[in-house]
Amino acid sequence: MNAKRTLPLSGVTVLDFGHTVMGPSCAMILADFGADVLKIEPAPHGDPTRHLKGFGTGYFGYFNRNKRSIAVNLKTVEGQEIARDIVRRADVLVENFAPGTMDRLGLGAEAAMALNPRLIYASLKGFLDGPYKNRLALDEVVQMMSGLAYMTGPSGRPLRAGTSVVDITGGMFAVIAILLALRDRDRTGEGRVIESALFETAVFLMGQHLCYAAQSTGSIPPMPERVSAWAIYEIFTLKDGRQIFIGITTDSHWQRFCAVTGRQDLLDNPAFATNNARVEARAALLPIITEILGKLTLDEALKLAENARIPFAPIARAEDLFTDPHLLATGGLMPTMLPNGIKTALPKLPINFAGAELSVRLDPPQTGADTRDVLSALGFSDAKIEKLAADGVVVVADREAASGPSSG
């Protein structure tokens, strides 16, 4: 391999006004690909996401690597002028505030584009323009109203997915639109406003079920009801009380499973000869497979499935990924220092980009870790920066303490 290439978004400046998940995940992807992402945080306490508990504990530390932080009070005249100066020099602005918030700060799409006609203004919303556009949305809200939660839980028990799947996917769609807009700007010299929305993202994820519904005369059952295209596509409980998922989705899978388990009788049974036949005979077949696997420990079941070369998975918890042998071997988790000083390892982008190392260059920053550098680049003197900090317009963190070298 030749020397590492420059990351593809090097030289692109992104302003991240995002909070929680959707906006920050979008900006993180851009940062991982080399963009200089300035996280614009409210002074004096920084992004409120920093202080969340429960499941929110992981938001800031995961979605804000490879970013620099400037903390500024946008409710002050001086803070607004700093923001305008930054906007004039930026390539991309990402925001996912509630409707009207950026307008109240004087940084709505129209105002920002007037300052910088080459700007790509990415507004990540709850809903695209329409009857719902002023509603407040959350990942879980749109999972419920799109049918995603209905499809995830058993009948009568709608259940949200176990991660912020719509927030993150909506952020990814915004990245796609941003990259296309940058490509278009190369051709036209003009910026543009692009939008991504939670509800429409969730509806897009439901497209395969809509297509199913269009071809069905009845209601579409939720996924736990297992109206499956395959007879064996199940979680099985093993001898040691642990569980494994097994998918036998082709006739070749079935033939290899029967060979490895020594069940020639199953292979010779015409009722199980083809996938569609096995689906028809599922009520008779499942107890047999349950009995076979129920005599095995997890290690034995994993070895059997691997030898049979069928799809399988142990039922993992989140913390199990820290010691997953594949992730350890491939570097799929990258060393990261969280703002509270905890050292951990977090997922890299699930992309191999030949010649580029998508690593942690900057750990998630302390509030205002880069305020001084950003303001100095704008032409502010040290004395002026100190005055702004004393007046509460900005937060200037001690850079050595706030942002040491990347742990990656």
Image (tube, rainbow, N blue to C red):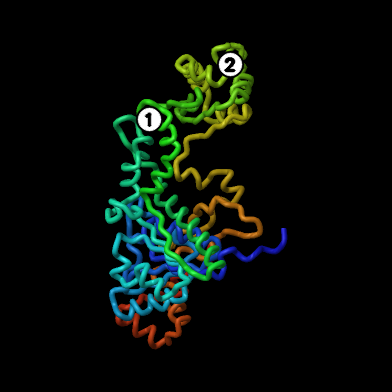
Q: Position of residue 42 (x, y in %)?
A: 33, 69
Q: Is residue 6 above or below residue 379?
A: above
Up the image or down, 126 lies above or below 157; here it is below
Residue sitting at 36 percent across and 26 percent down? Answer: 218
Of 226 and 133, the residue lying toward us: 133
Tell me residue 287's x, y (percent). Answer: 47, 17
Residue at disc 2, secondary structure: loop
* Amino acid type, mark 1: Ile
Image marks 2 and 1: residues in contact by CB distance under 8 Å: no
Residue annotated with mark 1: 220
Q: Residue furthest front?
A: 188
Above or below residue 78? Residue 363 is above
Q: Earlier in the sequence, mark 2 or mark 1?
A: 1
- Tell me: 168 left or right of 52: right
Rendered-image quadrant of the N terminus: bottom right
Q: Which residue is mark 2?
A: 273
- Rounded to the nearest angstrom, the CA distance separating label 2 from label 1 is 28 Å
